Image: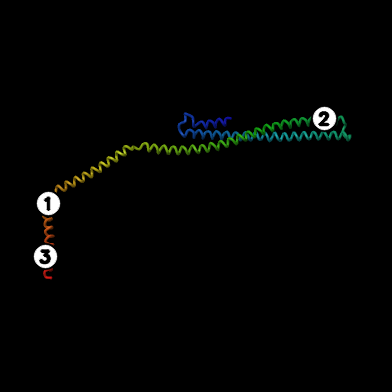
Amino acid sequence: MNIFRRLFKIGQSETNSAIDKMEDPIKMTEQGIRDLRNDLEKSIESLAQVKALAIRAKNDMENTATTAGDYHQKAMLILQKAEKGNLEATEADRLAKEALIKKEEANKQSDLHKNEVNKLSNSVSQLEKNVKDIKTNIQKWENELKTLKARVKVSKATKNLNKQMAELDSSGTVSMLERMKDKVSQEEALSEAYGDIANNNVNTDDQIDKAINSVESTAENDLAKLKEQLKLNKNNKQA
């Protein structure tokens, strides 16, 4: 059927060499679902029409069966009247025969309607199966569509992340860090050089004063120590 050919068309969309983007199978699946819904609507309409025909055929079968029974009953009544003398035997036979002929015709019509009912019942069963299959496939492809959309989101996010990672210039970053380290080292060396220059700029007088102050300071300390020693010696002699 065309329904199943469409299903195969949807299933083949992912392997079609002309399809190279995830959006394409999504569009194909969405179109396939729309086609299936149209088929479902038509199948339901056909099912309703065939069911209506089956119901009518069943009613006709029952009506003709009832008519056949009525003619059979009429033939019996006519014969009974003839036995009672209420109706001439020849006329009774003619009328009863006519009733039986009509009965046979009604039975034949009833059989035809019965065959029609059987055929229509088979058609109804097949259409009901088709409707069920279409509904099942619609549900299946709707779930597949959700999965495809989720995969598209994940693949896009992954692609963007990988693209960003691929575009990172690792060698450039390393070079930048090396240049920064060189710059810091250069600044440190320059600072040390300025310190040396500052020390070399101290004049001779400053150096002499520093030395004198250092000597005087030492002499004063020695003097204080000597006085302290003399004081201790004096105290010892008095003792």
Q: What's under tag 1, amino acid-wise?
A: Gln
Distance of label 3 from label 2 (alpha carbons): 178 Å
Quarter of the image with the N terminus is: top right
Q: Residues within 10 Å of mark 1 (few under 14, many from 20)?
A: few
Depth-wise, is mark 1 or mark 3 nearer the camera?
Answer: 3
Vertical side of 139 occupied by 208: above or below: below
User: Is tag 1's residue or tag 3's residue first in the polypeptide sequence?
Assistant: 1
Q: Residue 207 got which mark?
A: 1
**Few, some or many C-alpha atoms within 10 Å of disc 3 (few <14, some 14-19, many ≥20)?**
few
Disc 2 marks which amino acid? Lys
**Which residue: 13% across, 49% down?**
202
Residue type at numbered disc 3: Leu
Q: Residues within 10 Å of mark 2 (few under 14, many from 20)?
A: some
Secondary structure, mark 2, is helix
- Answer above or below: position of 123 versus 182: above
As drawn, the residue found furthest toward the bottom would be 239
Viewer-closest of 43 and 2: 2
Q: Position of residue 23 (x, y in %)?
A: 47, 34
Residue 74 placement (x, y as % from top left): 81, 34
Q: Is residue 64 left or right of residue 230?
A: right
Left or right relative to 176: residue 16: right
Between disc 2 and disc 1, the foreground one is 1
Q: Position of residue 83 (x, y in %)?
A: 88, 34
> Rounded to the nearest whole Å, what is the CA distance between mark 1 and mark 3?
35 Å
Circles 3 and 2 in contact, beta carbons < 8 Å: no
Closest to the observer, 101 or 223: 223
* Residue on which the image places disc 3: 230
Q: Nearer the viewer, residue 147 or 173?
A: 173
Relative to 161, say whether 19 is above or below.
above
The residue where tag 2 is placed is 97
- Residue 46 is situated, as x and y percent measured from the top left of the image, at 62, 33
